[in-house]
Each structure stands twice: as structure tokens, then as C-alpha cells.
Amino acid sequence: MLNGRLALVTGANGFVGSHVTEALLAYGAEVHVLVRPTSSGVLNNLQHLRDRLFIHRADITDKHSVLQVLKRVATAAQRPPVIFHLAAQSHVGESWHRPYETIAVNTLGTVNLLQSVVDLGLEIFRFDTAGSSEEFGNLHPELRTSYRFGSDGGLILDAASPVNPQSVYGTSKLAADFLTRNYHAAYGIPALVTRMFNNYGPRQGSRFVTGTIITQALRREYVELGYVAAKRDFCFVNDGAAGHIHATLFGIPGNVYVYGYGENISIEDWYRMIIRIGQEEGYWKDRELRLNESQRGRVGASEVQELRVDFSKLQSIAGWQPSFSWEEGLRRTIRWYAENPDRWSCGVDWR
């Protein structure tokens, strides 16, 4: 299905985007990437793939530049191309500091891409809009009977669960989600939505919780975190990239597909697992945990308390399931941060 087919990846130089790009190349796709123009032109996450890619520089918030990229894609494609739309401002906390940029990139950028497909009459095979588990937010009390709960009483989320985002980021992704399905209904674009739960792995920015724990542990005797009782369903990025591809190729247009590890863990226990594995691998000795919710917690009452996914819908249509245990995923992740300090040392938000 992918061998020789043109695949366009937006946000390809990002964390998940670079792994999706890598996987597509392994499947034999002709990969075109839409990346944000920068004065330096540096593509850190794509450097090792650069000679195998067709690179298009465009601002996803600029309709004209998006249209020009899709014109070139239309000319190059021998068969209907597949589009993986992963370009986003992806940091929840940062969305409160840059709300206008977050809405512009995540929501307007999605409209620009979809409308350009319509304007060009571009025939495409599939279109994947990357959503987020943050769209679910917290349990809505008035809709409690619409939720599912496990035998342990914990919340279980699937594609039919109510959405209740708690941040600018979550709301911007939900808007992109609905717009994608709107364009499918109105224009027949074969588009669907994927909501990957909390990703982690090599190349992720050090501001995200897994990276910030590891980089602090590598550099100092203590790790400072905010609220640590929240529970997350962590999915290793290689599994996440495979999920995007499986859902896009085998999913039904107009549908939403959710996936992750299928279990959750508190941030405190995630921290303890990381410290234990890092000790076993010889990267550090024991580390002290210091809590600082006022500086490192989410804004106001916007914390999402519990995320855990039921990925059976995707598994039933595509056979997808996670192949990396948390332990193996963390070993690979810690190793990457330890071996590549130049990739994160200037980007930490701790001192």
C-alpha cells in the first residue's frame, strides 16, 4: 500500500513526525515533508534521512504557501498520495503562554491544508489528522453515564467517550479533529483522526515530562516536578508512529481512532520507574524528588487527572497493538538523551 506511493508528512521535523517519516521510508514510500522555514534551515530530527526526502518549506498558517506545496505534490504523485498531518504546537503548558499561535498552527493550519486539497481538487488516498488524548480532558460530571470504567474503578477512554478539553492545546486539537470530519462529510475527503495517548521516546523535547525527568537526572542530584498524582497512558513513539500508519491505511474515513499502551501510571510512579531503570543502566545513582506545583504545575485547575485508552477499535481493523513495554521504551529513551546532550541541553526549562 505504501511502496512507491507519495506520502506527505507535515511537522516532519518534529518528534512524532520524524518517526512517522522514518517508518514510511522503511515501507518504501516516496516521502515528501512539509517543514517550517527557519533562518538556519537546520532539520535536526531529519538530518540522518535528508538525502532520502523531498523537502518543502512552508508555514502551515499561511494558506498560500500550503497551496504551493500541495501543487508540487499533485504534480509529483503517480498515485493518490497519503497525507499525515502532524504539524502542531504540541506543548500543553506552552499553549497558555502562546494561545494565538497554538490556535493558528493547530486549527487554522488544519483548515489551510484541508481547504487546499479542496481548492486543487486533489485526489488523495487517505488524510490523517493527528489529534490528542488531551481532547478527552477530565470526566464531565453531567455525562458520567456515558463513560466506561474498569474493574478497578478507573476511567477507560475510547473513540466514543465524551470530550472535555482542559487547555488551549486540547481545544485547538479538538477543533482540528471536528474540522477534519466536517471536510470529509462535506467534500468527501478520505480523512480520519488519530488520537495517540501520551507519547515518549528519542528526539522528544526535554520540556515534556519524560524528557524533563531524564535530563534532570542526568545533570543533577534531584528532579523537580509539579503535580505528580495525575495518571497517564504512555506510548512509546515507535508504536505511536505505527499506529498513525495503521489507522490511516486501514481506518474508515470520517472515523476517530484512539491508541496507546492501554494502561496508565501516575507521574510519581513513572518518575520512580525512570530513576530505577537509569540506575540499572548505570546512568545515575539515586535521585531526590522535589515537588514545586506552583512553578511546574498546569495553569489553575486545568490539570487532566486520568488518561487510559481502549485501543480495541484500531486493533480490530488493523491488528495494531503496542510492541514496546514501558521498561524497554524507557531504556531506549534514556540511552538517547544520555548519548545526545547537544540535542537538548539548550532547551531545558529547569535550571
Image: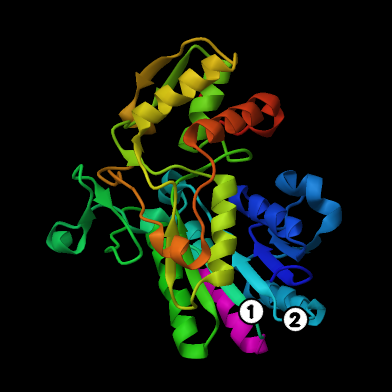
| Residue where numbered disc 1 is placed | 125
| Residue where numbered disc 2 is placed | 79
- The label on residue 180 is none
Residue 351 visible in this rendered orientation of the protein? no
Q: How is the image coloured?
A: rainbow
Q: Nearer the viewer, residue 342 or 323?
A: 323
Which residue is found at the position 54% from the left and 16% from the top?
Answer: 280
Based on the picture, tell me whether residue 113 belongs to the magenta stretch: yes
Mark 2 is on which residue type?
Arg
Which residue is found at the position 64% from the left and 27% from the top?
Answer: 335
Q: Nearer the viewer, residue 78 or 297?
A: 78
- Magenta span: helix, strand or loop, mainly? helix
Q: Quadrant of the N terminus?
A: bottom right
- The magenta-colored residue range is 107-122
**Residue 246 at what x, y percent from top left?**
56, 63
Q: Nearer the viewer, residue 219 or 319?
A: 319
Q: Is residue 218 above or below residue 125?
A: above
Residue 204 visible in this rendered orientation of the protein? yes
Which residue is found at the position 67% from the left and 85% from the top?
Answer: 122
Examine the image and state in which quarter residue 172 appears: bottom left
